[in-house]
Amino acid sequence: MRGVRQVFKRDFKVYFLSPIAYIVISIFLILSGWFFFSTFFLFNQAETRPFFSLLPILFAFIVPAVTMRLFSEELNTGSYELLLTLPVSVRDVVIGKFAAAVAFVGLMLVPTLSYGIFISFYGDLDWGPVIGGYAGAVLLGAAFASVGLFASSLTRNQIVAFIIGMSVCFFLTLIDKILFFLPESVVGVFQFLGADFHFQNISRGILDSRDIVYFLSVCFVALYGTYLVIQEKK
Amino acid sequence: MIKVEDLTKYYGSLCAVDHISFEIRKGEILGLLGPNGAGKSTTLRILTCFFQPTSGNVSVKDYNIYDHPLEIKGLIGYLPETAPLYHEMLVYDYLRFVADIRGFPKEKQLPRIKEISSLCGLQDVMHRSVNELSRGYKQRVGIGHAMLSDPEILILDEPTAGLDPNQIVEIRNIIKEIGKAKTVILSTHILSEAEATCDRVVIINKGKIVADGPTESLKEESGSSYDIHLSLQGAEYTDVEQVLSALSSIRKISRGEDTDHTVNLVLSCSAGEDIRSDLYQIIKQKDWSLLEFHRESRTLENLFRELTKEG
């Protein structure tokens, strides 16, 4: 447990030692703010739904940018040799790094709370879907972070890690939208694999255990994969 | 203290470490010698639980690497070959991180970091970030990292690489000092370093142990052949060569560069009799001026060359 905490602390702190954190947060806020408010006044409805419906696509390329350095950089500089010869297990390292990435994604979402506050002055906002939306956003962020972490463990090149992570995240987001040509019964199966589908359920304010289980299983599979990849390098 | 049994490591089809076994007692300084690619680093990486061996076992105290890697890692301070530190952290933050992750008690951390920084000469760089440091300073931070938690076992992979001569002497002294109470394993390809610091030497070639024993006895075993360095003024090389060829125990005369009227020679002599007094008599007779005359035994080097020769 001490290992997890220290790895988390270090990796989280390191985000803010380089400009990456500030750049990623700025890009996220500019894009989400612009896409959201450019249509907000046209619809003339006091809800945050448009913001959340756009979140999976934004996350699909923002989150892999957050996670790309976590293992790739260590593999590249060789520092994982120092890390893994300290008294920590591979499991602690994977969980610690994952937690750091999720915490960073969570932090990135904090400024967007102001959208809700702003709208509540403007009209009568239903807070249920907002709370559901943020719960879903954290789950979605965690799932994408675990995928990104897995991509990062595969290569020592951060750019490659980013592209792999982004591809998988986009695939998970768009899978149920690109299958319109298949019969409806088959689409249902693929729909269940899609991150966007589950996320939209939660962000409507419906907390269904199936959606939560989906995100947790994505996390588990990707983190276990990461563990195996790092273990294999030994 | 550490027991290595029948250790083997394959990288694909390449055999890096081939069934090696040895033991290290508490308080011993062991030097792991070998040419490049002999398997030194691989062996050390297995000892530190960074790599898993293909077969064989390593036990440290009562722990073995398969069941208790965390306990073993806690006992060992390790400096990898190129000291790959986290380059974006400050030196102080880095040492703090290592202390935290090793569970070093909070209230003792600051005094210990101060102690380490003065021991390794890091006072001036504590507030600098690691990627601004020169190669030698990184190496020193790496050594500090290894010693920080005052571990029972210290494993150093080429600890003096990249250091200046003063630092090398300092680090050797530190290693010797630590070696009185703790167990130290160091790998090196600098033979004089092994001779100067190690109690015992293990020579590895192509993944196999080719020699293992106390430094002193290895030297003796190899036959104590030696070199004599000679500088003579007012002599002609041909004369000198002619006169010296009368001495049977000189195996080879190598001529150094001549500098104004001075002949520089290195005589390789075989073991057994000491020819220094004979040499002196000859020189006195010829009335050459003797500028330099000293003996150098080069035993470990010979042994090393013999054992690790190609082919």
Image: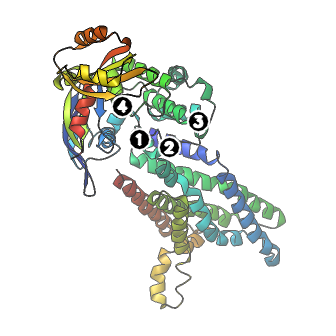
- Could you tell me which chain the residue with mark 4 belongs to? B
Q: Do the residues at pointers 2 and 3 share their chain?
A: no
Q: Give the amino acid at mark 3.
A: Leu
Disc 1 residue crowd, few under 14, some 14–19, many 20+, Cα 10 Å: many
Q: Which mark's residue is nearer the viewer, 4 or 1? A: 4
Disc 3/disc 4 C-alpha distance (Å): 25 Å
Q: Position of residue B261 (x, y in %)?
A: 43, 20
Disc 1/disc 2 C-alpha distance (Å): 9 Å
Left or right, residue A116 beside residue B306: right
Foreground of the two, B185 or B49: B185
Q: Which mark's residue is nearer the viewer, 3 or 4? A: 4
Q: Which residue: 71% across, 61% down?
A: A27
Q: Position of residue B135 (x, y in %)?
A: 53, 36
Q: Give the amino acid at mark 2.
A: Val
Q: Position of residue A57 (x, y in %)?
A: 62, 71
- Is residue A41 in sight in this rendering? yes
Disc 4/disc 1 C-alpha distance (Å): 33 Å
**Marks 4 and 1 in Cβ contact (< 8 Å):** no
Q: Residue B101: which numbered mark, if any?
A: none
Q: Earlier in the sequence, mark 3 or mark 4?
A: 3
**Residue ID for mark 2:** A7
Left or right, residue B78 beside residue B92: left
**Residue ID for mark 4:** B190
- Could you tell me which chain the residue with mark 1 belongs to? A
Note whether A113 is above or below B234 in the view shown. Answer: below
Disc 2/disc 3 C-alpha distance (Å): 24 Å
Disc 3/disc 1 C-alpha distance (Å): 27 Å
**Residue ID for mark 3:** B133
Q: Residue A88: which numbered mark, if any?
A: 1
Q: Give the amino acid at mark 1.
A: Val
